[in-house]
Amino acid sequence: MGVVSVHQYPIPEGKSGQQVIDHLVKCLETLGATKTGTFCVDCETYYSGPNINPSRVLNIIHNSEHPASCFALLDTGTCLVCDTNFDQLMLTMSGLYHSKKSTKMESKGTRFQLGDFIVKVGSVSIGPSFRGILIEVEYGPCVIPNYCWDLMKEFMGGFMSSPRDPHQYLQGKMNDIFTPIDTIQQYNDHFNSIRKSTAAATSTASTPTHQSSSGRSTPSAGIAQSIPTKQ
Amino acid sequence: MNLESTRRSAQQEYILQGSIVNDSCEILLHRLRGLCDNGDAAPETFKDHEYVYTIRQPNGQPLTLRVRQSLEKKDYPWHLRYLGQPEIGDKNRATLVRSCIDVACSSNICTFLSEMGFKLDYEYISKGFIFKKGRMKVTVSKIFRLLPPGNVNTDEHVSQSYLVEVSVVAPTGQDALAEEIRSFAEQLKPLVQLEKIDPRRLQ
Amino acid sequence: MSLSVNVSLETADEYSVQEITYDGQEKYTQPLSMSENLTKLAQRIDFSRVNNYDDTEPEKSDTVAEEKETLQSAVWPWESVRNKLKSALTELCVLLDDMNVAKDKRYLVLDPVSQEPSEFKPLTALVARKKALAASAAIIQNGVEFLKSHQNDATRSRAMDFHSELMTIRQNWRMKKVGNTILGDLSYRSVGSRYPHPGSFEVTKAPTPQPITSPSNVPSPRASSLKVTVASDLEGVSYIHVNNDTLASGDLSIPLPPVAVSSLESSWQQKLENAQNVLFCKELFAQLAREAVQLQLPIPTLVIGNQIIATLFPGVQLSIGLCHTTVPNKKTTEKQQQTPSRNEHKPVLEHSLHQLLREIHYNSLHHPMPHPATATLGISRKMYFAGPEAYDRHTLMEACKSETMLEQIISQSQHVVLRLRTMYMIDTLACEIKDPLIIAHWLCLNSATKSSVKINIVSYGYESQSRTPLVIHVGVKNIKAICRDGRTFHMSYESQELRYLIMSQVSQHQINAIQALSKLMGWKVLSHNVNCGVGPVEMIGTASSIVLASPNGDRMIAVRHGPQSGAQVSISLSPHEQDFYPSTLVKDRKWQNINGGFKEVMWEKIEGKNLVSKIEYLMACLTNF
């Protein structure tokens, strides 16, 4: 487990998501990356019932890279790492915390390996609808983000417009040892911002479930403040 | 409906409980060491700190979660446990059966639960010996109060006896295990009487 | 058919002849009484054939019915079934009627048929009674004898007492009593084995302690009053034969060690131990065979009969065989011992196979205890940590990976083969190369798949001056060598590669030794080159060279040493010649001081035991003071 950086990839006007992904995959394969299977990061959002005060939003995230684990993120920023039996426990708490199936998000796609780098190109979807592209880049041999950020930036420049700064969450932890939680936090931030932007963009045309979800996610201001800086 | 399907897929704990006074505990330990696996090694000790969190559900029923930390092996994951309502059943059923969910989790579980809205109900230290016989787990433990609060190295024991528990956690529907536990309990008979104890009736 | 006539039959009013005596007189049998006749007839009835009911019906109707049957059966397939059912019903009705008749006792009374009363002869009865008494007396007498002898045995030696012996066996083996039989358990289930063989044995009392009465077997141990019966497939002795061979031997004819054969007829303890060993070997072999079938190797493993063959290296195979002999056939064993077996047994590998299976047994029982105490029982520590520590896919896969017993034994045997090859290679090299000396120290600390050897190359007589150490790690499929300068070489299982390395090390050692010697002798090193580019190309490696100058600089020695070509020594002098004759070209004597051309020394003629001592001799000769 090295350092992981997750970025949103903008979709230019007039192109479909699949076209962009195909283009990225072609870029990576030209660079010499080899496909090493698929990956999936899914996020289910639970909202606290009326008897819990203050109300909370709980995101349960699974990452196929850590198949035995389940990450539970509260909107206070606390992240619990536990084994997958926690999903069952959430079901017993259905009276206290309930989820809406339509708000389940996932980023799914192909995993590439190129030397010490692992690149994952994921298409983000809420339910059946496509919402954007997230690119995860992992550099294996290093655990301190600060030491390898420039290298990663340069690598990312090879196939995407490389970001100027690391993800906002990562910026505060540049000199700490990178943990799997840091990956999950980045995904969580991206999911939140994608959820917000789609809710804002389609506020008039969206289905009622999306509206309610965007209304619900307002209490989660603690994490929703981070809209990733894209140049 | 959702809840029901979970209960069905969940694990169940078959358990018998009993107690033994301090003086006879040594004999029981000898007996257990002979009966259980790996009698060649000294019995394994444990010292756990248990926190019990509750929250009131909308239907008025409290939901209780138990968090345990091993004080002997502090680097081990913490353990979060949900125990369902115990079913006594009729005379034919050999043991108490309750659904249970075991989750190994990181050490920030206490913060996590209190942020979720749970309240710490009570806490205690459980100290004793643990044995294994096939799939059965046998614990002989003593309960200590944390007095003064927060003092982990307490010697304020609750009673002059040890709690003895024989349990198996298995997927639902393996009632043959109950018989296995009963026959094991039979072998401890004169020393300790293991029974189906309904905590609701004790209150 | 329509003209059928009813024919009445009755028995002839004659008595049947029993025998005709020699004088022609006929003896008749007595006519049967009514009841006797009934008995006789009743005996003839075959109750199992109930279908014969119809036979009593008149012939005509029978045939008609038959015709009808044949006609109708084509029309209606259930005809036969209906008929059967109908006849069954009829029979049942008849049976019911019969029972009613018998029960009512109005029409018929069922009485036991009286048999012919046996003739009472007082004399024979007396004889019979006497006989019976004598027989029972003999039984009692036997019992008394037996008890007496038993008592005697007991007093003579405690060990022969059945019960005390039973106690001994009880202390050493798992026993239980089922009904009237005493059963024991040989199996390894209590220590974690999952082999399905019941492995039970039965303990009975030995019939008679014969060995005591027979004076012939004096050296035999005291006879036991216990008889132990094991399952027939566990009898005899067996062991796992392991050997690595260059060719596959088709038939496995494995000699049993004579010790094992002789121990067959000894005490129950030995017998039980043998049986348990047989069971263990069976389990071991079954496990290996299962793994061999599942294992995916580039060259697949073969399981033929009681043999498993796996390829270690090209041309080298490992064969594991299960040998089991029940009847000790002295002749064959002798014959086998005479022919020196080509497939030599490897007891070390057999031992490690035993160890591996015992380890599996141990691990199946010894799980780590859960902490905290309420945590899930029976999952490995790694799997318990996997969730909360967020292990990634790779780590989890590593944690799940485990080598099977066969893979482990294959790698161990590969190591054994490689180690032996290396050992042999180093030894032959040490014999071939006398100068310098190659000394190998095998380290005693090694594992089943890793061992290392330290090689010192020294020149005889100059050990303290120059020494070239070399460490070689022998692994499973490859060899790693670490040289003095820290360079490491990875080599394959072909020991030729190591041979080349050592030869080039030898060559470099010679040059290094000369360099060390020069320091001692006060000579100056002008150049030292381990990869000398001049001269003929070596077959392997490169030649090394050194050029030395004498203390006052008037003599020079150049040595070139190649791994295969050996040493080549040349000297050059300054001044070239003692006398100077000025010529038109060289006018002054000073030009004589320039070194002349190198002249090769006839190296064989120089005195000295080895290269370094010869060089020393040469240096001593050339040094001017």
Image: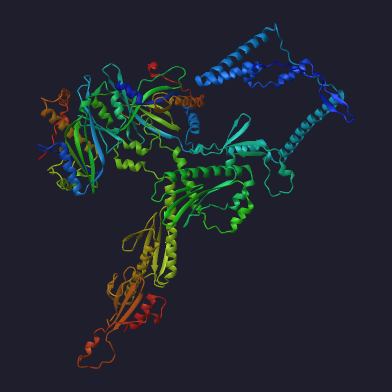
Q: Nearer the viewer, residue C362 or C409?
A: C409
Residue C445 visible in this rendered orientation of the protein: no
Q: How is the image coloured?
A: rainbow
Outermost residue, right side: C23
Where residue C289 sits in the image (x, y, percent)?
47, 45
- Eyeballing the image, is A70 above or below C38? below
Residue C583 visible in this rendered orientation of the protein: yes
Q: Nearer the viewer, residue C519 or C342?
A: C342
Give the quarter of the figure containing the N terminus of chain B.
top left
Q: Is residue A33 left or right of residue C26?
A: left
Outermost residue, top side: C106
- Eyeballing the image, is B103 above or below C424? above
- Eyeballing the image, is C573 above or below A220? below
Q: Nearer the viewer, residue C183 or C573?
A: C183
Outermost residue, front side: C3
Where residue B137 sits in the image (x, y, percent)?
43, 30
- Eyeballing the image, is C82 above or below A102? above
Where residue C145 sits in the image (x, y, percent)?
77, 35
